[in-house]
Amino acid sequence: MVLKSFVEVDIDSHFPLENLPYGIFIIKSSEQQQQLPHPCVAIGEFVFDLSVISSVGLFNGPFLKDSDCFHQSSLNKFVGMGRPAWKEARTTIQKLLSVDEPTLRDNAILREKSLLPMSKVQMLLPTIIGDYTDFFSSMYHARNCGIMFRGPENAINPNWFHLPIAYHGRASSIVVSGTDIIRPRGQSHPAGNSPPYFGPSRKLDFELEMAAVVGPGNELGKPVDVNEAADHIFGLVLMNDWSGTTISPWIVTLDALEPFSCDAPKQEPQPLPYLAEKNSKNYDISLEVRIKSAGQEQESVLTKSNFKHLYWTITQQVAHHTINGCNLRPGDLLGTGTISGPEPDSLGCLLELTWNGKNSLNLNGLPRTFLEDGDEVVLTGVCKVISMFSYDFFFLLLPLFSSI
């Protein structure tokens, strides 16, 4: 059954009533006054200000009635409240925005206060990210990189199939979609007896990733059971782990994604008991990367992948991360690692697509191996159910420029 809102939602909109991703916004203003961030969800071409709805008492269920979670400048408090509060909020918001519900539909003053055109707001990071971990969960990506740097006889180290490998990243350099990225500089291999070269990166890449936003955390010293890990994940964002890390402003909840759940790949050998899931699932999210070069109007599609290709699930990632009692906290970010698929056009970074620069790509007639100054990189994710309803997952625009 297709849900219908009184808010006009185009058939190709990223944000129908079935989606309702969460974010944080401020109102754009020419005045030099401090704008307070507000929690919201997206509906059509509007943001729905949850602080307004909370102020008039329309979140009146047992979990949200006396809560100030929608009067915060981030979503941390809300995501930390857990699944019962998330479900209550989703049910209330869907009802208020429904075509058959008069509470908001027939109240012009409240509609004007709570529904703001996206063109008049600026999106911020949705949570305060205390910690950030990036996993290495795509078997196809691991295999391709292994072949490039170690050879086909040792493409994937045996331990990769026993645990979801990860590293701890720097949370302070995570930025929201639309933030300009500066080309990094560093040292490169010396030629002969010369000293190492220092200068701008010659192989700046994108990495097609997604990331789980942690909901309720766990106490220090108490691991999260893999079969209960989903209750510790609020939702997913798109992520590009390049010079710094860029995420989309919208968090799509696992409740919204549930119609698109699918079986995860079979894992051989079977994982150890702490990673063995009763129901191992991924999500069928079609992912795409496009690039628009400086001075060009037309974008070029570089890759089409899918979240379902991940070998290690997001719930296994949570279980492994906490197995020694590491305490996750609301708003923490767990990246999937580059999401590559089995086909040549489903590779999740330029390193793979060009085989480390050996094979040039064609961008509307221009040869390309890695990112150049002025490139705009666009990541999108789409979930669709044929004959029932379809909706775009969220949209991420990443402009790139160099300070050199």
Image (cartoon, grey):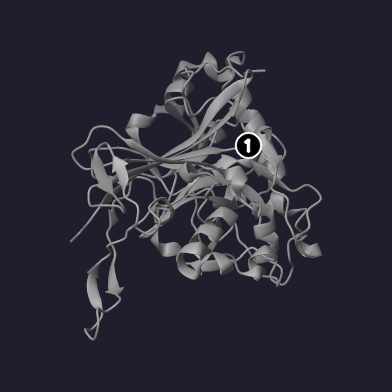
Residue 112 in the image: state x and y as whole percent.
42, 22
* The residue positioned farthest toward the bottom in the image shown: 193
* Residue tagged 1: 257
Question: How many numbered marks does the figure carry?
Answer: 1
Q: Is residue 126 in view?
A: yes
Q: In the drawing, does residue 1 fall left or right of residue 368?
A: right
Q: Nearer the viewer, residue 201 or 36?
A: 201
Task: From this view, report whether residue 50 is shown above or below residue 11.
Answer: below
Label 1, secondary structure: give it: helix
Q: Nearer the viewer, residue 20 or 245?
A: 245
Kind of residue sitting beneath label 1: Leu
Residue 380 falls in image quadrant = top left
Residue 5 in the image: state x and y as whole percent.
55, 18
Assign the N terminus to one quadrant of the image: top right
Q: In the drawing, does residue 185 fall left or right of residue 139?
A: left
Q: Residues within 10 Å of mark 1 (few under 14, many from 20)?
A: some
Residue 394 in the image: state x and y as whole percent.
48, 36
Q: Residue at x 26, y 46 (%)?
A: 367
Q: Residue at x 52, y 39 (%)?
A: 22
Q: Nearer the viewer, residue 40 or 19?
A: 19
Q: In the drawing, does residue 82 fall left or right of residue 33?
A: right
Q: In the drawing, does residue 92 fall left or right of residue 267?
A: left
